[in-house]
Image: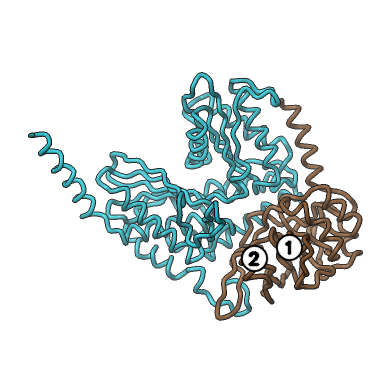
Amino acid sequence: MKGQAIQLQTPLSESDVRNLRRGDVVEITGMIYTGRDAVHKYLHDGGESPVDLNGSIIYHCGPVMVQENGVWVVKAAGPTTSIREEPYQGDLIRKFNIRGVIGKGGMGKKTLDACREHGCVYLHAIGGAAQVLAERIVRVDKVDFLEKFGSPEAIWHLVADKFPAVVTMDAHGDSLHEEVEGISRQKLESLF
Amino acid sequence: MKTSKKRPSVVRKTKKAGKSNLDPKILEATFLEIIRRTSCELPGDALNAIRAGQKREKPSSLGKYALGVVLENVELARKNSLPLCQDTGTVTFYIKHPHEIDESVLKRAASAATAKATAMGYLRQNSVDSLTGKNSGNNLGPGSPVFYIETWRNPSMDIRLILKGGGCENVGTQYSLPNVGLKAGRDLDGVEKCILDAVFKAQGKGCGPGILGVCIGGDRASSLSMAKKQFLRPLNDTSDNKDLAKLEKAIVKKSNSLDIGPMGFGGETTVLGCKIGALNRLPASYFVSLSYMCWAYRRQGATVGLDGSLKGWLYPTGAAGGTKTGAKSGKATSAKAKPARTGSVKTKPVKTGSAKKGGRR
């Protein structure tokens, strides 16, 4: 982390993404789409996307949503564990031109390869910080697949204002998760 | 004949005594406030440990940044009376009560409060039928909530609650010693290797820095439940057993030397505490069971009067300013505070706030 957070505005261009390095702290403003298990499987199996994902950010999140006076409101919106989407994510990045993935815990080699080849980054949101993250979502524009997949699995169109995250897998093939795991494995072995 | 005549009268007397004192409505309100507070307010011991961790992390490091967001989150959740994390987890009650109180009355009140807390948004709809995948919608169902209930001789009740999310629950584990892969034998050195291995494997997944609950021995089932029960201990206490106290301290130090750090970003704060218990075992078995709790160390408890009213909190929140409910310290607050507590539940429900800009309340 080097001082101030890097400001990102969606949709992202390839050069926006290529300029980021693992360890950068970013703040995202603009549209973010949620999508987790059901959405990833559906799109991977050939389903049509109800939204234009070109240059988009997909957020692995099952938010707590409440309708108040006909308006959807985000009550809590922390990230869910991303590794479950590993079988699908890389293919979807390429197919739909996704430029950013937000989640928790990092992802595997397939996704890292797709990030490098296509130009995409993995952004780690702070796990459990459901209130801070919900506060940075200023508006809910729309929802797709609410009936089909249920609220936690639907595609929510969230308008973010300075949504904080850390680049942990960049478009240059570097993964902070791989790095920390390597260091900690060595330290563990030296303790044994 | 004499004894058979005596027995039923004793039973009847006992039941009467329970019924005449306990007000199920008051008890339900007490349960509801315990749930609200557990979901929305981090106990002071955990908060202090996170603050200390944040101070320890290097300036401009990702670990320091992550813990800063966490601390901001804790303050927001408390201020707005909203859940710390969207995964409000498994609802697990630990209750001690005098024998004259009927266990079923306690379960009914706890279940009713759980359903109400779910409707009010303090708990996420988190109970799913394992075969059909259907969500019960109110956190009730077979095994939900979880109850550990025992009687004691004190003239009051001790009601505690742990809310533990899926991310951290999934990295809990159980080892059987000896373990060839870890070169872990059937001694405390072997136990230490198992725990450190579990900490390594949990990195990035359990929303660290975490708290470890461990049990040495028991059978498979009793061992895991004992491991989780360790979370009821204050974070800064010391085990009565000298060897375990030493091991707990060593585990914290060694875990924090692995450079896993908050969220697995690297850094010095990997675990906030380690609590180890032990149960006797069969000669053939040597289990090491481990439960991992995320930084959102949601556990709270209260001393509850025999009428069901809340007498005082067992884990001080320690947050600056406290809440309307008053209890900044763990010392008993007056029973008169009860209506205010119920009131605070009613005046700060998650669903009542209107959102002008479509943002959060």
Relative image position of residue A58 (x, y in whole percent): 76, 63
Residue occupying the far left of the picture: B2
Query: What residue lies at 32% left-to-right and 62% top-to-bottom?
Result: B25
Disc 2 to disc 1, how far (Cα)?
10 Å
Relative image position of residue A170 (x, y in whole percent): 85, 54
Q: Name the one closer to the observer, A69 or B33.
A: A69
Which residue type carries mark 2?
Phe
Give the colour in which the image draws chain B.
Answer: cyan
| Numbered circle sitting on residue B148 | none
Q: Is residue B263 above or below residue A139?
A: above
Quarter of the image with the N terminus of chain B in it:
top left
Give the colour in which the image draws chain A.
Answer: brown
Q: Are marks 2 and 1 on the same chain?
A: yes
Which residue type carries mark 1?
Tyr
| Numbered circle sitting on residue A149 | 2
Q: Name the one closer to the observer, B135 or B83.
A: B135
| SS at badge 2 | helix
| SS at badge 1 | helix
* Circle 1 residue: A42
Q: Which chain letter goes with mark 1? A: A
Label 2: few (<14), some or many (≥20) within 10 Å?
A: some
Q: On the picture, is B80 further left or further right than A54?
A: left
Quarter of the image with the C terminus of chain B in it:
bottom right
| Label whose residue precedes the other's in the sequence (2 or 1) | 1
Relative image position of residue A178 (x, y in whole percent): 80, 43
Residue occupying the far top of the picture: B283
Label 1: few (<14), some or many (≥20) within 10 Å?
A: few
Residue A27, picture quadrant: bottom right
CB under 8 Å between callouts 2 and 1?
yes
Q: On the picture, is B135 further left or further right than A84?
A: left
